[in-house]
Image: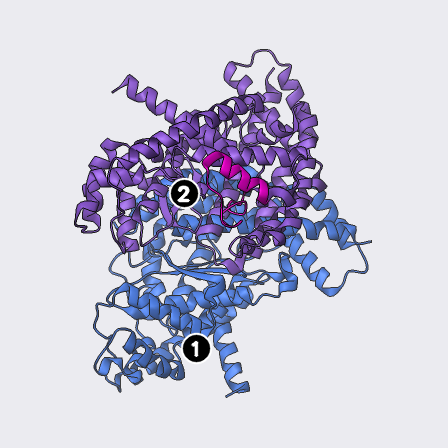
Chain colours: A purple, B blue
Amino acid sequence: MTSAYTALEKRFRRLSLLGEAVGMLQWDMSVMMPPASAGARSEQIAALKLLSHELMTDPVVSEHLDQAEETNGLNDWQIANLRRMRRRWLHTVAVPPDLIEATTHAATASETVWRTARPENDFPAILPHLQKLLSLVREVAVAKSEAFGLPVYEAMMDLYEPDATTAMVDDLFDDYTKFLPGFLEKVLHRQKTHPDPKLPKGPFPVHQQEKLCRRLAETVGFDFKCGRLDTTFHPFSGGVPEDSRITTRYDEDDFTSAIMGVMHETGHAMYERGRPKAWRYQPVGETPGLGMHESQSLIVEMQASRSRPFVTWAAPVMRSAFSGEGEAWSAENLYRWTTRVTRGLIRVEADEVTYPAHVILRYRLERAMIKGDLAPADLPGAWNEGMRALLNVVPPDNQNGCLQDIHWYDGAWGYFPTYTLGAMAAAQLFASAKEADP
Amino acid sequence: MTSAYTALEKRFRRLSLLGEAVGMLQWDMSVMMPPASAGARSEQIAALKLLSHELMTDPVVSEHLDQAEETNGLNDWQIANLRRMRRRWLHTVAVPPDLIEATTHAATASETVWRTARPENDFPAILPHLQKLLSLVREVAVAKSEAFGLPVYEAMMDLYEPDATTAMVDDLFDDYTKFLPGFLEKVLHRQKTHPDPKLPKGPFPVHQQEKLCRRLAETVGFDFKCGRLDTTFHPFSGGVPEDSRITTRYDEDDFTSAIMGVMHETGHAMYERGRPKAWRYQPVGETPGLGMHESQSLIVEMQASRSRPFVTWAAPVMRSAFSGEGEAWSAENLYRWTTRVTRGLIRVEADEVTYPAHVILRYRLERAMIKGDLAPADLPGAWNEGMRALLNVVPPDNQNGCLQDIHWYDGAWGYFPTYTLGAMAAAQLFASAKEADP
């Protein structure tokens, strides 16, 4: 008797399609929609999300989950799918609707203020919003913690990285913290034995960059017959497996930033495209966590596209794309440029070696804030102290410090660890692949 | 006690937002989506449409409609809104779900065959599909006819032009049929007293055409701060009042076709944008019928943009857009070119004088087919005979005859009259406006 389970599959299929429709409306909002039309679009998205919420919180779902879990005769795939359904359901019902609404409003207000506070380096302006949002986010986490029977921070991480524990993350991050200083010294020392790499001199016209990005994305496997590349200020990967929508932005002085962005989003898109077709529209067919998703973008961007064989192949392609001349276009120089390591201040510009330090800092600070051990007012000081300890650099201001990332100001707490979990998985997968097929 | 009515407003607001989301997915499908991704998109659209259908056919809607209609104390606006709700609901529940599904499938199959049958001039290939679709469309119309208490053809028209009667349409069309031959002779005779107008010689590069189209659309009132102009093979106007999405196509040999297309869609978009904000998301705030909608596109395209004052202003703008030289760019020549009248074969290329004849032909033929007085197999002969009688021209083949329009092959029966109802309303509104403010 699997009818409860079958009803659940049907409902989750519908929820998945509703989610895809919302995703498409959001893609359009970021890529195509005139900004002045945002109000009307929000109404559409809110209506679809409310429908989803009602479909998920319908009392029959709870009954079906209970019945299905007591059913004998489900196969392993169905059991795994059912487990994911239960978890999704729990994430939705664990939090009272008015708390969700209050958090959403606080996040929107906070994000709006952050968008001007960051360029204006104005931490005091965002502080009250951060305090309010943190307290709501903590309430949400406490509610989920009770529903899941998990520690508060793990209940937050669970939304992004199911089953991740702080014990596991601490192990990895503490290990890296010990490893980094000596290794970084060694890397920087060795870098000095070579001439400094040079970025070829621009300007690099956008249409030439775009053509090159398309060629490179296609080379590693992006299929433009069922995908698009567009331009946005914040690059992302959206769409569905059959219709990949990736974006990038172009810097006329540095073509490598658009290329690496496109390679990153191409990795995300190819992973989505590779999801099993027979598992489509069911929770178990989706990514097990953002760390795994990120590993697939980083395996393309950080492992493959910065490998010596790739850069050796790509250097003349890049040179001819811009009719470049001179030593800066040599494979050797471009390889050194794209793999150079620096003690930087900004996470999104960080190299493979120092990136985890940026993440570890955020992970420790957000845990402390959630626990109440660190007050938001003390964040700038703690940030700068952490940067000094981890990378031996101190930001000159908060714009280059604790104001740089949107996550905390947008309500995405517990998200940061997935970046480094993904980077580690990517490095391990790539190393294994090379070992298996040198 | 207005709670039943209030519940209906809430539900129809939600239905309206779901419809907007579907519209956006369709816009993207026509304008942005790679064609290979159509399968995934259809699933998304089908899921949203099924949700809409369930929201409308929920038994509580019927109860609320009954209760609201017995409520005293509704104001005129609410009563009008309620009337529209009842009609929408009737259109949905009048037809059994399996008949809707069969009709949708037959229409999709027929349209697919039509897409190759038209260019290949292959009426026999489409005939069985037309027969099948006609019989299903008639079944739908009979079901609606019973639900509405209307004659069968009026029940079909009601979807596009509520409250239109065949008596009213016959009056107008018979009158025009009598008026046309003499008037057309007079117009053609008078045209001959002037030199033939000439289209300036191209090619006209697409990017220059697009820039010009944007300028002209803005001049008559299109607001690009909350709207877009894109390129599609079949031009249309989509989006929502706060986010107009119009499209056109460009002919490198004839820039006037893109311009007039853009002016037409601009009229549609401005009408939508002008809908009362306080009536947003409610049925009574939407257009009362497609004839009225079309009148607003035609008042811009046919009345304003082809007026002598407009062309006099626009001629030098057009000339400078393409750095044109010579007499063909004079306002006098361009005015004669854009207002020239011909006995043509193709509806979408027809001028203001002969356009109604194309519509009258289709109206009479589709009524005869619905009634059973004309068999689809006899359509080509009846078409050619009708063209001879109305415009004194006979198509050399079915591609230029009964295969030219998508409507019948796509299931849109009862739609054609709205074009001419709109054209007549546009002419009357423009004449009144000129009279009121010469």
Segment tinted magenta in the rendering: A380-407
Residue B322 drawn above or below residue A376: below
- Residue at figure coordinates x 62%, y 53% from the top left: A124
Vertical arrangement, residue B426 with respect to residue A14, above or below: below
Helix, strand or loop at label 2? It is helix
Q: Is mark 1 on a helix, strand or loop?
A: helix
* Position in image of residue B235 (x %, y %): 38, 59
Q: Mark 1 points at which residue?
A: B304
Residue B255 in the image: state x and y as whole percent.
29, 69
Residues packed near mark 1 inside 10 Å, few (<14), some (14 to 19) or many (20 plus): some
Whether residue A143 is situated above or below residue B122 in the rendered picture: above
Q: For marks 1 and 2, give the one nearer the viewer.
A: 2
The amino acid at mark 1 is Ala
- The residue labelled by disc 2 is A349
Horizontal arrangement in the rendering, residue B40 relative to residue B195 (left or right): right
Can residue A396 be found in the magenta stretch? yes
Are there few (<14), some (14-19), or many (20+) residues within 10 Å of tag 2? few
